[in-house]
Image (cartoon, rainbow, N blue to C red):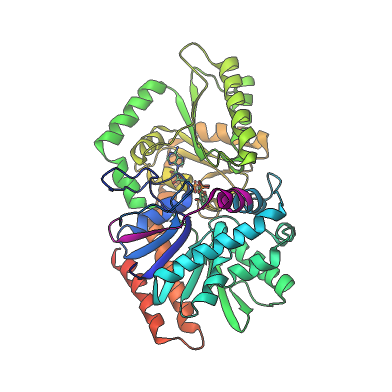
Amino acid sequence: MRQSSLVVVANRLPLDDNAAPDGACEWRRSPGGLASALHAILQKTPATWVGWAGGVGPAPQLPDIGTLRLRPVALSEPELRGYYEGFANSTLWPLYHDAVEPPVFDRGWWETYRAVNRKFAEAAAEVAEPGAAIWVQDYHLQLVPQLLRELRPDLLIGFFMHVPFPPPELFMQLPRRVELMRGMLGADLVGFQRPQAAHNVAQLAAKLLGSEGADDAIPVDGRVVRTGAFPVSIDVAEMRTMSARPYVINQARQLRHDLGLHKRVLLSVDRLDYTKGIEHRLTAYSELLRDGRIKVRDTVMVQVAVPSRERVESYWGLRDRIEGEVGRINGEYGRVGEPAIHYLNQPFDRADLAALYQTADVMVVTPLRDGMNLVAKEYVAARPEDTGALVLSEFAGAADELDDAFQVNPHDVDGLKDTLLHAMNADPADLARRMAAMRKYITRHDILAWARDYLRALDHTGRLAAQVPKQRRRATLSTQQLGARR
Ligand code: ADP
Ligand code: G6P
């Protein structure tokens, strides 16, 4: 396989499992923030993406997508169970999200997690040019930076954590906490969504590794690992263009008509995940109906909940609970031809999502903990006329940036109910001011700005290293390419 000067390593390749018979393949835009974010920047950047193509068994042959090469990593059934469903999504995911579901500590999963991380590291080492920049993504691959450094000391290694990095009290529960810290700190630059995460890591490095550093620099094995916050974003221009397409405008008009022209439309769009606070918002909505503060004849809710991680045990009960609650609410408050909630457990393409965003008077985003939450930013980008209200959990990373949203603590159901009503009844001038401010912010801080800032910082980190091998300068190429697209 040809080699690249920029290699992205992420658990998933962002493409459809079902490549067309002629071998043509399309970006899948799988539901999930990581694929959404990186999709925007990598289509036109010469790079290789190392990742899992979904399914088990031998890796498929995959064609390039534009200038992006794909290097699939095959997973066997036991690897999928121990690494993806087990350690990544039953131990790390819940623990990193404030343990809102109890993390499962199964001793059998660790070896598989380590072995699969090695597989990804080897694949990345194989496709990386001398001195290339490697950008490792997320909690699935937390050991890859260190493994890669052992295999290829010439590389410039970045790591970005899309999910929250927990406070020491929680991280300390992990039986393999030292290995996980060392693995991640094998990178030259470790990026997080929020500054608090970098602070947590600095505290943990001191505690677990005896590495006394600062929130932006941690000494490890004679190197200095840089850390910092780089809040991820969306392709604002793409969403704006999409929103202006006649199909989207017509679709939005049709949806409005179908939902009721005179009604206030509340919308939520999530992966069906227990971190998203779906049950909390259903409780709030149902109580508003019960208390008579809203009526089905003037309000309707649309809940899109795309299926996710359906083989992971903690997700099984969730779907049943949500569907039971939606059924109960519709049974109690709906009328013939007029449900209180429309529940859609299916994936949507981007245009249909944009139409939904345009239809919604109030976007309700209530995660109990979320690295960023791109849905909140997508809604803002899809509202060029500065109408609509965003209700946003203060536990989403996006809350740091979108301070003109109606912010809520989703655990406080009474507060959530009041905030929903406040957002529904807000003065249009107030809504316009808030939306314009948020739109201005995300337009400046879009996905290209995120990638450029991160890769520049990585490049800078490489230059700061005591002896910069000449080859490393090649890594700057990718930064310049991204910069040139703006
Ligand atoms: P997470 O990364 O936890 O899934 P985010 O809100 O950051 O949460 O990202 C979710 C991404 O998945 C967004 O880009 C959103 O548009 C997309 N998405 C969510 N629901 C659907 C759906 N039903 N169909 C297609 N894409 C979806
Ligand atoms: C979050 C994670 C991503 C993940 C996505 C979808 O955004 O940070 O790494 O890809 O959820 O989850 P899945 O398990 O389907 O890849």
Q: Residue at coordinates 56% horizontally, 71% vertically from top-left?
A: 147
Q: Give the left or right position of residue 246, taking residue 195 as reference.
A: left
Magenta region includes residue 435: no
**Displayed quadrant of residue 356:** top left
Magenta region includes residue 77: yes
Q: Residue at coordinates 62% horizontally, 71% vertically from top-left?
A: 215
Q: Residue at coordinates 37% horizontally, 63% vertically from top-left?
A: 48
Q: Residue at coordinates 43% horizontally, 62% vertically from top-left?
A: 450
Q: Nearer the viewer, residue 435 or 369?
A: 369
Whether residue 446 is visible here, answered yes or no, is no
Instruction: Give above or below for 58 relative to 120.
Output: above
Span highlighted in magenta in the image: 65-86
Q: Nearer the viewer, residue 428 or 255?
A: 255
Q: Give the left or right position of residue 129, taking residue 92 as reference.
A: left
Tag count in the figure? 0
Q: Give the left or right position of residue 315, taking residue 465 as reference.
A: right
Q: Quadrant of the N terminus?
A: bottom left
Measured from the top left, where is residue 227 in percent x and y? 56, 70
Measured from the top left, where is residue 128 in percent x and y? 40, 72
Q: Quadrant of the C terminus?
A: bottom left
Residue reaching furthest bottom?
467
Residue reaching furthest front?
58
Measured from the top left, where is residue 477 in percent x and y? 34, 74
**Displayed quadrant of residue 180:** bottom right
